[in-house]
C-alpha cells in the first residue's frame, strides 16, 4: 500500500511539474503570436540621447512589440533631448508611421534638474505610452477590449509628470529665483603604484539664466595636477601645475532665426604656454530651421570676431612674451536625424587679422546610415589644418613633456577616421529582458 501510494504521489508530482513548466510557455507563445498579429503595435526605438535605457522601456511597456529593424515597425520613434535652462532636460519624441501608416506626432517631456534616474525613466515611459497609444488608436491596432486597460495604466496619476508641457516663459510663472540656476562642484582623483602617482583636484562653479529670448551662462573652474614618476636612472620626474578659468556667455534672440552673442574668457593654461589669456568675442548666428527643431534637424551659420590678450610663460617662436591679437572665424553646421539614420557636418575656418597666413581650418563629418535591411554603416572623419599656434614656446619640449602630452607641440595638421559596418539578423520579435550577469566580462 505504501509503495503504491508513493508511486501515485510521484506521478502526481511529476504531472504538476510538467504543467507548471509547460503551461506558461504555451500560453506565452500563444499570447505572443496573437499579440503580434492582432494587438501589439510594432515600434522601432531610435534613441539619440544620453541615458537611454531601451531595456527599461521594453520591461515597463509590455503591450508594445519592440522590433530591432525599422522595416518591421508600424511606428518609428526617434527620441532626442537637449538641456534646459534650469539644468534639466527636454525630451522630444517623434512618432512616425511606416509603410501604409501615414502618421506623425510629437510629444515633449521635461525632466526637472532634481529628478532621479527612476523619475526620468518613468516620465519617458508615460510619454512613450501616450504617443504609441494615440498612434495605435488612430490606426485601429488596439481592440476596444485592450484599449481601456492600457489607457488606464498609461494615463494613471502614478505614471509621472504629464508630457507635452510647453516652454515656460518669464511671464508665466512666479519664480523667486528669476530663472537663475547655480551649481557648485568639485572632485579629486588619486591614482598610483610603486613607481608613479597622480593627484588631481578640481572645482567648478556655474551660474545661468535661460529664457526663450535670452541665455546667460557664467562658469569658473580650477584644476590642480601633480605627477611623479620614477625613471630608469633612479631620478624622479615631477610636474605640478594649476590652471584656472572664467567664462561668460550672453546670447540674445534678434528674430525667429537670428541671434547675437557676446563671450568673455579669462584663463591660465600652461599646456598652451599661457600664464594669462583674456578674450572678448562678438558673434552673429543664423538658423535656417526653427531653433525648436534643433534636436532633429539644424543648419546654422555663425560669424565671430575676437580680441585676445596673451601673456606667455616662455618666449614664443615669434619672440613675444605678451601680445594682443584680433582674429575672426566662420562656422557652418548641419545636423539631421531621420528614419534612415543621421548625418552631421561641421566646417570652421579662422585667421588672424594682422597676418592672414596664420589660419586654422577644420572639417568634420559623421554618417550613420541604414543601407539595407539589417545593414548599417557608421562613418566619422575629421581633419584640421593648423597654422595659427602663435603661443608655442621657443624653448621647445622636453622628452617627458612630449611623452606625457603636458605641452602642446607644433603641428601642421591632425586627422581621424572611423568606419564600421554592422549586420543584424535573427528574431526581430524578442521583447524579453534578462538582466542576469550584466557586468564585466559577462556582458
Image (tube, helix red, strand yellow):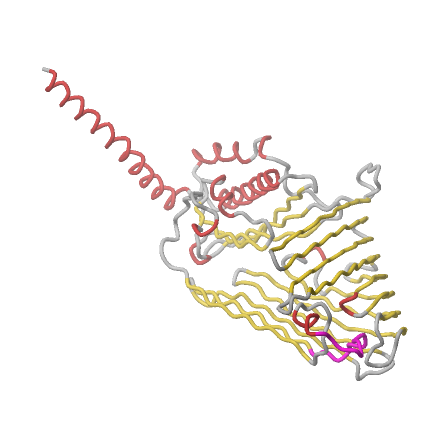
Residue 14 percent location from the top left of the image: 20, 29
Residue found at the far top of this picture: 1
Q: How many marks?
A: 0
Q: Is residue 369 above or below residue 119?
A: below
Q: Nearer the viewer, residue 66 or 402?
A: 402
Name the residue located 79 percent from the left edge and 73 percent from the top edge.
329
Residue 442 % position (x, y): 43, 50
Residue 343: image quadrant is bottom right
In this view, 355 is above or below 177: below
Along the line of sight, the residue nearer the viewer: 270 or 380: 270
Range of the magenta residues?
A: 385-398
Please identify the quadrant where the N terminus is shown. top left
Residue at x 64%, y 52% (from the top left corner): 81
Residue 298 vs residue 414, the one in the foreground? 414
Q: In this view of the protein, which residue sits in the foreground, 146 or 419? A: 419
Query: Do we see residue 387 in this rendering?
Result: yes
Q: Percent x, y for residue 245? A: 81, 58
Looking at the image, residue 430 sits to the left or right of residue 25; the answer is right
Whether residue 396 appears in magenta in the rendering, the answer is: yes
- Residue 263 visible? The answer is no
Residue placed furthest toward the front: 234
Give the residue at x 85% y 71%: 312
Residue 220 located within the stretch drawn in magenta: no
Q: Residue furthest bottom?
A: 357
Amino acid at each position: 500500500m505504501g509503495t503504491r501510494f508513493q508511486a501515485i504521489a510521484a506521478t502526481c508530482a511529476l504531472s504538476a511539474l510538467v504543467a507548471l513548466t509547460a503551461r506558461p510557455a504555451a500560453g506565452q507563445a500563444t499570447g505572443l503570436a496573437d499579440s503580434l498579429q492582432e494587438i501589439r503595435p510594432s515600434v522601432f526605438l531610435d534613441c539619440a540621447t544620453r541615458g537611454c535605457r531601451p531595456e527599461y522601456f521594453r520591461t515597463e511597456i509590455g503591450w508594445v512589440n519592440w522590433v530591432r529593424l525599422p522595416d518591421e515597425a508600424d511606428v518609428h520613434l526617434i527620441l532626442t533631448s537637449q538641456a534646459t535652462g534650469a539644468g534639466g532636460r527636454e525630451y522630444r519624441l517623434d512618432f512616425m508611421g511606416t509603410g501604409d501608416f501615414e502618421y506623425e506626432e510629437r510629444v515633449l517631456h521635461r525632466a526637472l534638474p532634481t529628478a532621479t534616474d527612476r523619475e526620468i525613466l518613468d516620465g519617458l515611459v508615460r510619454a512613450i505610452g501616450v504617443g504609441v497609444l494615440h498612434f495605435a488608436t488612430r490606426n485601429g491596432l488596439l481592440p476596444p477590449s485592450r484599449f481601456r486597460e492600457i489607457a488606464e495604466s498609461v494615463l494613471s496619476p502614478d505614471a509621472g509628470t504629464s508630457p507635452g508641457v510647453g516652454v515656460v516663459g518669464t511671464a508665466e510663472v512666479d519664480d523667486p529665483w528669476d530663472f537663475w540656476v547655480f551649481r557648485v562642484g568639485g572632485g579629486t582623483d588619486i591614482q598610483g603604484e610603486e613607481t608613479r602617482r597622480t593627484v588631481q583636484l578640481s572645482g567648478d562653479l556655474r551660474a545661468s539664466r535661460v529664457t526663450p529670448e535670452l541665455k546667460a551662462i557664467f562658469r569658473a573652474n580650477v584644476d590642480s595636477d601633480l605627477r611623479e614618476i620614477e625613471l630608469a636612472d633612479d631620478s624622479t620626474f615631477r610636474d605640478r601645475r594649476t590652471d584656472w578659468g572664467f567664462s561668460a556667455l550672453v546670447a540674445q534672440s534678434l528674430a525667429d532665426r537670428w541671434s547675437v552673442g557676446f563671450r568673455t574668457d579669462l584663463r591660465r593654461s600652461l599646456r598652451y604656454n599661457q600664464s594669462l589669456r583674456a578674450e572678448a568675442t562678438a558673434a552673429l548666428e543664423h538658423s535656417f530651421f526653427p531653433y525648436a527643431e534643433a534636436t532633429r534637424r539644424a543648419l546654422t551659420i555663425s560669424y565671430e570676431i575676437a580680441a585676445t590678450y596673451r601673456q606667455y610663460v616662455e618666449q614664443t617662436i615669434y619672440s613675444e612674451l605678451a601680445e594682443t591679437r584680433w582674429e575672426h572665424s566662420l562656422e557652418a553646421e548641419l545636423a539631421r536625424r531621420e528614419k534612415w539614420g543621421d548625418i552631421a557636418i561641421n566646417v570652421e575656418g579662422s585667421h588672424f587679422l594682422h597676418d592672414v597666413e596664420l589660419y586654422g581650418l577644420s572639417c568634420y563629418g559623421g554618417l550613420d546610415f541604414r543601407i539595407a535591411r539589417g545593414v548599417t554603416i557608421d562613418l566619422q572623419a575629421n581633419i584640421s589644418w593648423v597654422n595659427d599656434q602663435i603661443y608655442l614656446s621657443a624653448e621647445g619640449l622636453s622628452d617627458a613633456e612630449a611623452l606625457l602630452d603636458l605641452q602642446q607641440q607644433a603641428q601642421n595638421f591632425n586627422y581621424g577616421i572611423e568606419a564600421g559596418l554592422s549586420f543584424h539578423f535573427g528574431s526581430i520579435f524578442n521583447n524579453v529582458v534578462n538582466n542576469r550577469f550584466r557586468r564585466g566580462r559577462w556582458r
